Image (spheres, helix red, strand yellow):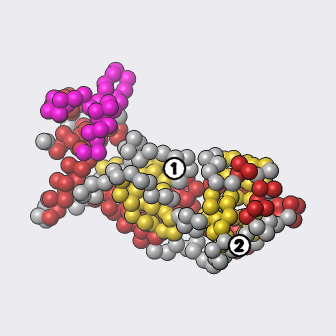
């Protein structure tokens, strides 16, 4: 199979423009269209839907895309093994991450990364809402849990310690709970999934953070907003240490039930589609994040 046509197909999926993808590979628009048509004839399926206005990925194209990327990665790995690989890291890297973490820890690093790899385009999808890695055609994603999905591979980036927080003003007004059972009589701030979260103390005692049982609850889907609302005295919330460690240090926030942490001991994971070969662009970005974030974990202080 012609890997140059595969590169064209992958670029067309990323740009949703066959002519633009062709120009990026030095092809005239007519040549690019012909090569895509020949690839579709070879695989026996329409990979892209064309209209006068736009290009979109067909269902068959969605299924074929990860294999096309893997075949390209296999070729690059084979050439690299012979000392003939391309030295430039280029193309487009689609990366998805929680907005709250990305704003604090990834965005400040982006200028340095793009200086290192000027021919690589970073396409960042930043949202605290859940997303599907495969359906979104992302090359790499950051998540705080490993999914039971056999098509994905995970690499740990850092610990993600979670704890209960409230502002001093809230605790002065409503009192400080002494046991997990007392949480239900308080105002709880939580993400929209409303799932109960298990708590465990250093001595093995267990409890639960269950917004459904709370006297009053506030629901949202953005971590930075949750932090802000908690700081303003709206209630008690579960926060990652990386998000609130500075506020805990200066007293703007106070740990509630300080002996308790989230029972599932979450971590931050870099998730990517399972493949025999990790593409060069994914590998260099993972290594960069592990070097600048994973090894430092500046938030992992005593609290």
Horizontal relation, residue 80 to residue 53: left or right: left
Q: Residue furthest top?
A: 52
Horizontal relation, residue 203 to residue 90: left or right: right
Q: Which residues are magenta?
A: 40-67
Residue at label 2?
Answer: 258
Name the residue rendered at 82%, 66% in the picture.
176
Is residue 143 covered in magenta?
A: no
Residue 91, placed above or below residue 291:
above
Give SS at disc 1. Answer: strand
| Quadrant including the N terminus | top left
Q: Which mark is residue 126?
A: 1
Residue 227, placed above or below residue 212:
below
Crowd class of label 2 (few under 14; some 14 to 19; many from 20; radius 10 Å): some
Of badges 1 and 2, the one in the foreground is 2
Horizontal relation, residue 124 to residue 24: left or right: right
Name the residue rendered at 32%, 32% in the picture.
59
| Quadrant including the C terminus | bottom right
Q: Is residue 52 visible?
A: yes
Separation (CA) of disc 1 from disc 2:
31 Å
Name the residue rendered at 20%, 37% in the picture.
27
Q: Position of residue 263 (x, y in %)?
A: 59, 65
Q: Quadrant of residue 41?
A: top left
Q: Quadrant of residue 30?
A: top left
Q: Position of residue 28 (x, y in %)?
A: 21, 33
Q: Position of residue 92 (x, y in %)?
A: 34, 49
Q: Position of residue 70 (x, y in %)?
A: 24, 50
Q: Nearer the viewer, residue 134 or 188?
A: 188
Crowd class of label 1 (few under 14; some 14 to 19; many from 20; radius 10 Å): some
Is residue 49 covered in magenta?
A: yes
Q: Which mark is residue 103?
A: none
Q: Residue furthest front?
A: 205
């Amino acid at each position: 199979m012609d890997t140059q046509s595969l590169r064209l197909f992958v670029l067309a999926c990323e740009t949703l423009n066959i002519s633009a993808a062709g120009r990026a590979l030095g092809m005239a628009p007519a040549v690019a269209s012909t090569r895509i048509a020949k690839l579709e004839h070879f695989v026996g399926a329409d990979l892209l839907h064309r209209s006068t206005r736009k290009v979109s990925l067909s269902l068959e194209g969605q299924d074929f895309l990860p294999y096309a990327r893997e075949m390209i990665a296999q070729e690059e790995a084979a050439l690299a093994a012979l000392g003939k690989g391309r030295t430039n890291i280029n193309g487009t890297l689609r990366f998805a991450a929680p907005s709250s973490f990305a704003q604090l820890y990834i965005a400040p690093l982006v200028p340095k990364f793009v200086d290192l790899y000027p021919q690589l385009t970073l396409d960042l999808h930043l949202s605290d809402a859940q997303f599907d890695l495969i359906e979104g055609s992302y090359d790499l994603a950051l998540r705080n849990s490993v999914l039971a999905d056999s098509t994905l591979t995970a690499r740990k980036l850092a610990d993600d310690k979670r704890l209960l927080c409230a502002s001093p003003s809230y605790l002065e007004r409503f009192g400080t709970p002494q046991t997990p059972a007392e949480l239900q009589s308080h105002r709880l701030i939580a993400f929209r999934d409303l799932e109960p979260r298990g708590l465990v103390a250093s001595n093995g005692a267990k409890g639960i953070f269950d917004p459904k049982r709370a006297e009053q609850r506030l629901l949202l889907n953005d971590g930075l907003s949750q932090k802000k609302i908690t700081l303003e005295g709206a209630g008690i919330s579960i926060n990652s240490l990386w998000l609130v460690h500075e506020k805990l240090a200066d007293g703007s926030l106070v740990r509630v039930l300080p002996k308790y942490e989230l029972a599932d001991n979450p971590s931050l994971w870099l998730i990517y589609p399972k493949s025999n070969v990790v593409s060069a662009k994914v590998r260099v970005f993972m290594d960069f994040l592990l070097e600048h974030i994973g090894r430092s974990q500046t938030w992992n202080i005593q609290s």
